[in-house]
Image (spheres, rainbow, N blue to C red):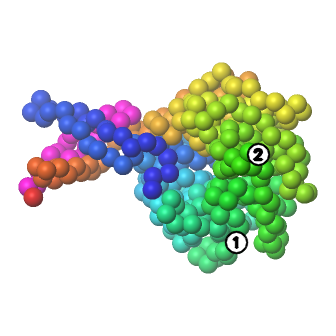
């Protein structure tokens, strides 16, 4: 299962006139920005298409480090205990990346099926194992950075996706059974609360954030955000946020920000009034979102870009984390009724590449 990005056909441009324009059918785009995490002066962004994680300088809006081969379809990312932690959806693993070594050292840690969201809280790394379209999963992996290869497994609702902390509890959105789980950080005890289903319509919760004394959950099923009382787990307000699949949530200290995947939009919720307004900036297929006191960062899953918004919702910068920033040659393979073609290609910008070598093998 490819968690983000549509199935596409990538156009490959030949460098020499002896080559024709060819088309390589791929399972996913070359680049698909997914998860985001803010750490001091940096923003870390995963690229599910390129299996990489990039470090962005928050002041200059430039990519200053790119860690390739971080895992298979990386999604969520968090920073803690001097490491960057990446959930690899297709690989059933979490990667512990040491950004201070050259090259960055990567340790692969076995977790559950479909690792998706990741957070660092209480000195531990928390990873949601969301399952796949054909395999159910209802666990969260709790990793001790000192003994990372033996994570604790915690049972929650079915299909856990987003995860966030309020300092005492971890909050988990369970997309397949329409519940929210509350995990006590100190002892891993769990309480699970159902979300309302008005008219029998499923909420399908995805993202989760904590702020302004509440827990906020993005409901992809009916295009809203639920505001939850953390003491009781009950929904105290449901806020419409446009249409077509709210995914990620972030709190900037004042407002709650929502990424709407299907409508290429970002919404801003005022907790004082429980109302939402669309930001003026548009982001193509946004998923991951992170915020601080001055900026909102949004991952555009089609095209491999991260958009930086100011707190008014206006676009301040666009950062390219795609393979266009990579100078090293990459392999490309296509199979059809004429045989197997193998290219060595070099990315020039976005999804455009030039062919360096070509080999055709007959069947």
User: Which label belongs to residue 27?
Assistant: none
| Res 125 → quadrant | bottom right
Is disc 1 surrounded by few (<14), some (14 to 19) or many (20+) residues within 10 Å? some
Whether the magenta-drawn stretch holds residue 356 is answered as yes
Residue in the foreground of this view, choosing between 99 and 167: 167
What segment carries the magenta color?
343-362
Residue located beneath label 2 in the image: 198
Whole-number angstrom distance, CA of label 2 to CA of label 1: 27 Å
In the image, taking residue 29 as reference, residue 141 lies left or right, namely right
Whether the magenta-drawn stretch holds residue 206 is answered as no
Relative to 203, is 142 above or below? Answer: below
| Front disc: 2 or 1 | 2
Element on which disc 1 rests: strand
Q: Residue at x 8, y 55 (%)?
A: 362
Residue located beneath label 1 in the image: 155
Residue 52 on image: x %, y % = 47, 51
Q: Chief secondary structure of the magenta span?
A: strand
Relative to 148, is 133 above or below? Answer: above
On the question of residue 301 being in view, the answer is yes
């Amino acid at each position: 299962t490819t968690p983000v990005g549509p199935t596409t056909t990538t156009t490959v441009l030949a460098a020499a006139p002896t080559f024709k324009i060819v088309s390589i059918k791929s399972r996913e785009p070359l680049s698909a920005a997914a998860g985001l995490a803010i750490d001091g002066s940096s923003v870390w962004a995963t690229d599910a298409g390129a299996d990489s994680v990039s470090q962005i300088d928050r002041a200059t809006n430039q990519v200053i480090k790119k860690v390739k081969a971080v895992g298979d379809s990386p999604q969520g990312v968090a920073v803690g205990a001097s490491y960057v932690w990446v959930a690899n959806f297709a690989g059933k693993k979490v990667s512990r990346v040491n950004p201070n070594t050259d090259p960055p050292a990567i340790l692969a840690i076995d977790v559950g099926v479909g690792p998706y969201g990741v957070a660092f809280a209480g000195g531990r790394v928390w990873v949601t194992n969301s399952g796949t379209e054909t395999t159910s999963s209802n666990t969260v992996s709790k990793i001790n950075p000192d003994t990372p290869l033996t994570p604790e497994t915690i049972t929650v609702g079915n299909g856990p996706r987003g995860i966030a902390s309020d300092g005492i509890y971890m909050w988990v959105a369970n997309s397949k059974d329409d519940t929210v789980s509350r995990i006590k950080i100190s002892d891993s005890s769990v309480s699970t609360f159902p979300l309302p289903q008005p008219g029998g319509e499923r909420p399908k919760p995805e993202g989760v954030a904590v702020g302004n004394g509440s827990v906020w959950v993005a409901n992809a099923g009916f295009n809203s955000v639920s505001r939850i009382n953390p003491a009781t787990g009950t929904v105290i307000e449901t806020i419409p946020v446009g249409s077509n699949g709210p995914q990620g949530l972030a709190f900037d200290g004042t407002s709650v920000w929502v990424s709407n995947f299907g409508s290429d939009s970002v919404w801003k919720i005022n907790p004082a009034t429980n109302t939402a307004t669309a930001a003026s900036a548009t982001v193509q297929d946004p998923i991951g979102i992170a915020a601080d006191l001055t900026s909102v960062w949004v991952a555009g899953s089609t095209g491999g870009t991260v958009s930086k918004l100011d707190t008014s919702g206006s676009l301040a910068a666009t950062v390219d984390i795609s393979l266009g920033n990579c100078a090293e040659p990459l392999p490309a393979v296509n199979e059809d009724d004429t045989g197997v073609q193998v290219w060595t290609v070099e990315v020039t910008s976005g999804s455009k590449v030039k062919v360096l070598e070509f080999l055709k093998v007959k069947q």
